[in-house]
């Protein structure tokens, strides 16, 4: 049904946008060069006050459709260069050609300028942070919502910011903000508890992401890396955003003749409105608040010091009342009704502070020293009593009892109890350096990190069916599940890396090699791992604009904490680093269609993994089985086409096919699907605007993820062979710009506003019931039934955004 509706809608939007826009646009082409006449790649080219833009290719060339019959301003910007503007007025379907020269900026020499002037960015894909302005995420931040639309990335939970990449789990993804590694709460077990992610999209200046094959300077995880940079302000700016899901405020400024700059953001979020659409009814009171600041003091052009600080508090209070879920098949329709007593109170408090000293004696050398501290205090407490009734429904549509209960299959009770507490601190000092010569770009780093974790688990479940406790005993009352443990960990890690990116002379085209090595030592198990990595990027001088990339290397992931805790709550002392040997081959092909630029990207990959720790996933909670050991593999193909499906705005579609399996030693069942074995994944991010009136904008994101494996509760890992239904979701938003630079506000207040827009968003447009996990009930005859835990249904959100 989703495909029958979605495909015609997309085709209609594409065709109507194309036909209506023909007579209202002109074509702008040209080339961007530096002061020496050398071509500049990846220059951002945007129309002021319009949602339109593109970037230059490796020859500095660009093509952009612009509005006709009016004067428009084109802005050319690139990191390390002075921004340039051109004003143009063209007639309908006129073709205008220009050449733009950008001059290098001498006002600031930062480490980003040393590393970004290489065509090879170590397999990192750059994402325009302005795209996050169009997205409102049901969970997490708009940055993660954008990442979920990329190839190789999958997620089956809109309430969570977590995602899996190429068969990995949530804990295999690296996230950096200004070179600081970011951690997430440990005790989170459901998306509705998660609230805000760390990344504040109001503060972001650049986004880079790699789904695999990343270089040695990125840390010790097996799947992906998300590298975020917060911006350094140059003038007084700010924004205010409010919606039915919360709001945010941010202010940025530069003072004291440019010596002091700061950018600060405050966010508040509540999922109460969204959670009201779940089957489980009750009093939801989730409150998530955080404040972040990034402050820089510039001693001179060569020396500056910066501070990144964050305080976040996630409170989740819930008093469940009733739940009614219909499921089953057409032949056997079922219904479960549950009546609740009790409540849940969770509190997650995290704090992060990082001090960075940057010294760049010249434009080729940058030295950075970082000291950071992360502290987390988490509490998960609940006592919830539920009485359930499992019924079979009448399916005969001609019967007066159609949809009513005709047979009671089971009656039972459960009592869930938890008093779980965790205190964690991570302290680190590190040094990073970069040196850029004529043909080489050297990067190196060393880091010492101390971790202290205290964990207390006290949780149990009592269950009965038709008056008999499970498991049954005629002499005592037994608990269905119990876990009571205390564990503590004090460890020290030392990591170091060195890598070189150099241009290799070839007869034709450009060839870049990136080779590096990374080491990691952990005092807990006295293990040292060495991870060599290599990537090759080749840009042939062909008529077609095409490039190739090959990457290989070892990606070792030592345990942090959760991977050590066995099902009895004890720490496994024999745990070793998980190992992944990866090979990937990819290409980028840039072509022109409808007089507009497009890029087709593809990557094929294979991962051979050993020393794996098997795990099971329930919602977003990962339960590791460190007393077992496995080997496995992941293989797949990722494809993405992006470009101007509508003239001047970027859209893309991503398609991934993947298979991942593991073989647990000694279980006798051979290779079985890993919990993230999602064979097929499709995502779409589409933008449009009203022809002739681009103040009206539209965006749409669509997702399809095939069935994920799952099994009964407390089961053996090899029993996880049942597959839940596919994940299908479409979100859509329409916005109207009321105030912009081309249509400024009037009055004492409105004249200070740069932009003001109103948005109407529809979450889960097709109102599809997506399953995230299961609640298992027992019938009167001892059979177990999997009752789906559905995610949110269709909801409308109103949002107002103001920048000044």
Image (cartoon, rainbow, N blue to C red):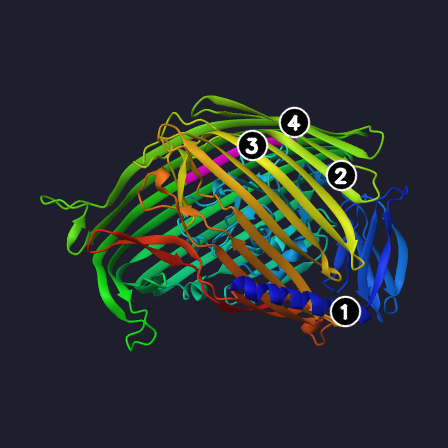
| Mark 2 or 4, nearer chain start | 2
Q: CA distance from mark 3 to mark 1?
A: 55 Å
Give the alpha-carbon distance from disc 3 to disc 2, as whole Å.
Answer: 30 Å
732 relative position to 645: left or right: left
Q: Give the residues in magenta.
A: 424-432
Q: Earlier in the sequence, mark 3 or mark 2?
A: 2
First in sequence: mark 4 or mark 1? 1
Question: Closer to the observer: label 3 or label 1?
Answer: 1
Residue 203 visible, this angle: yes
Asked if the residues shown at circle 3 and circle 4 are in contact, with their CB atoms under 8 angstroms apart, the answer is no
> Alpha carbon of mark 4 to alpha carbon of mark 1: how far?
49 Å
Q: Position of residue 202 (x, y in %)?
A: 61, 56
Q: Residue at x 22, y 63 (%)?
A: 408
Between residue 538 and residue 368, name the one nearer to us: 538
Residue sitting at 89 percent across and 44 percent down? 35
Please give the residue where the numbered disc 4 appears in the rendered image: 516
Q: Mark 3 or 4 closer to N-term? A: 3
Magenta includes 426? Answer: yes
Prevalent SS, magenta region? strand
Q: Quadrant of residue 559?
A: top left
Task: State which quadrant residue 561 falls in.
Answer: top left
Q: Secondary structure at mark 2?
A: loop
Name the residue that disc number 3 marks. Answer: 429
Q: Is residue 205 magenta?
A: no
Left or right of 318 in this view: 553: right
Residue 296 at what x, y percent from top left?
A: 65, 45
How crowded is the residue under tag 1: few (<14 C-alpha within 10 Å), some, or many (20+)? Answer: some
**Residue corresponding to mark 2:** 119
């Amino acid at each position: 049904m989703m495909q029958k509706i979605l495909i015609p809608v997309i085709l209609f939007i594409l065709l109507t946008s194309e036909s209506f826009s023909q007579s209202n646009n002109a074509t702008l082409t040209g080339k961007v060069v530096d002061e020496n006449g050398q071509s500049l790649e990846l220059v951002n080219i945007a129309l002021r006050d319009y949602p339109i833009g593109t970037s230059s290719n490796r020859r500095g060339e660009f093509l952009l459709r612009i509005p006709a019959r009016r004067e428009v301003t084109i802005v050319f910007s690139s990191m390390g260069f002075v921004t340039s503007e051109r004003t143009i007025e063209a007639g309908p379907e006129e073709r205008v050609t220009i050449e733009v020269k950008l001059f290098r900026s001498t006002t600031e020499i930062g480490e980003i300028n040393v590393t970004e002037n290489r065509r090879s960015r170590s397999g990192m894909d750059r994402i325009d942070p302005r795209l996050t302005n169009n997205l409102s995420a049901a969970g997490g931040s708009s940055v993660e919502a954008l990442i979920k639309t990329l190839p190789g990335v999958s997620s089956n939970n809109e309430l969570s910011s977590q995602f899996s990449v190429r068969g990995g789990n949530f804990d295999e993804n690296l996230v950096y903000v200004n070179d600081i590694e970011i951690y997430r709460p440990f005790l989170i077990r459901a998306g509705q508890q998660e609230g805000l992610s760390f990344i504040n999209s109001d503060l972001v200046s650049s986004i880079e992401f790699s789904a695999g094959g990343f270089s040695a300077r990125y840390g010790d995880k097996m799947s992906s890396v998300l590298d975020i940079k917060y911006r350094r302000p140059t003038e007084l700016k700010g924004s205010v955003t409010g919606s039915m899901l919360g709001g945010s405020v941010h202010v940025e400024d530069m003072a004291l003749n440019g010596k002091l700059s700061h950018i600060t953001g405050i966010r508040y979020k509540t999922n109460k409105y969204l959670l009201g659409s779940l089957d489980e009814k009750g009093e939801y009171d989730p409150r998530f608040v955080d404040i972040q600041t990034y402050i820089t003091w510039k001693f001179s052009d060569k020396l500056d010091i910066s501070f990144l600080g964050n305080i976040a508090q996630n409170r989740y209070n819930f008093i469940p009342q009733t739940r009614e879920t219909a499921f089953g098949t057409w032949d056997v329709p079922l219904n479960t009704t549950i009546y609740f007593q009790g409540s849940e109170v969770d509190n997650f408090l995290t704090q992060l502070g990082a001090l960075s000293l940057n010294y760049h004696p010249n434009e080729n050398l940058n030295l950075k020293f970082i000291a950071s501290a992360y502290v987390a205090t988490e509490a998960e407490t609940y006592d919830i009593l539920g009485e359930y009734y499992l019924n079979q429904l009448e399916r005969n549509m001609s019967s007066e009892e159609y949809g009513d209960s005709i047979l009671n299959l089971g009656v039972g009770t459960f009592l869930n109890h938890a008093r779980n507490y965790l205190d964690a601190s991570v302290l680190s000092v590190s040094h990073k350096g970069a040196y850029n010569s004529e043909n080489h770009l050297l990067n190196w780093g060393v880091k010492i990190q101390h971790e202290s974790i205290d964990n207390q688990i006290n949780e149990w479940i009592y269950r009965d069916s038709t008056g008999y406790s499970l498991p049954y005993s005629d002499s005592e009352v037994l608990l269905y599940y119990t876990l009571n443990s205390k564990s503590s960990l004090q460890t020290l890690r030392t990591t170091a890396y060195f890598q070189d990116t150099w241009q290799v002379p070839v007869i034709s085209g450009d060839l870049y090699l990136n080779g590096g090595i990374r080491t990691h030592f952990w005092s807990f198990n006295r293990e040292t791992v060495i991870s060599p990595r290599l990537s090759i990027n080749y840009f042939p001088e062909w008529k077609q604009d095409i490039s190739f990339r090959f990457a290989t290397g070892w990606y070792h992931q030592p345990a942090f904490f959760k991977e050590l805790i066995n099902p009895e709550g004890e720490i496994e002392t024999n745990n070793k680093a998980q190992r992944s040997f990866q090979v990937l081959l990819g290409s980028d092909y840039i072509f022109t269609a409808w007089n507009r630029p497009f890029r087709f990207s593809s990557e094929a990959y294979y991962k051979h993994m050993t020393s794996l720790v098997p795990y099971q996933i329930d919602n977003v909670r990962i339960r590791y089985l460190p007393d077992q050991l496995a080997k496995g593999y992941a293989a797949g193909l990722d494809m993405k086409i992006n470009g101007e499906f509508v003239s001047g705005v970027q859209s893309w579609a991503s398609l991934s096919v993947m298979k991942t399996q593991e073989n647990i030693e000694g279980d006798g069942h051979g290779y079985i699907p890993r919990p993230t074995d999602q064979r097929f994944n499709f995502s779409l991010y589409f933008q449009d605007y009203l022809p002739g009136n681009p103040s009206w904008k539209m965006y749409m994101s669509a997702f399809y993820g095939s069935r994920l494996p799952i099994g009964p509760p407390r089961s053996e890992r090899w029993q996880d062979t049942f597959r839940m239904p596919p994940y299908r979701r479409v979100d859509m938003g329409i916005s109207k710009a009321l105030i912009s630079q081309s249509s400024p506000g009037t009055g004492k207040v409105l004249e200070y506003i740069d932009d003001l827009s109103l948005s109407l968003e529809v979450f889960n447009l097709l109102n599809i019931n997506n399953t995230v996990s299961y609640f298992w009930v027992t019938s009167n005859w001892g059979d177990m039934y999997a009752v789906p835990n559905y995610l949110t249904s269709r909801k409308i959100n109103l949002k107002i955004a103001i920048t000044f």
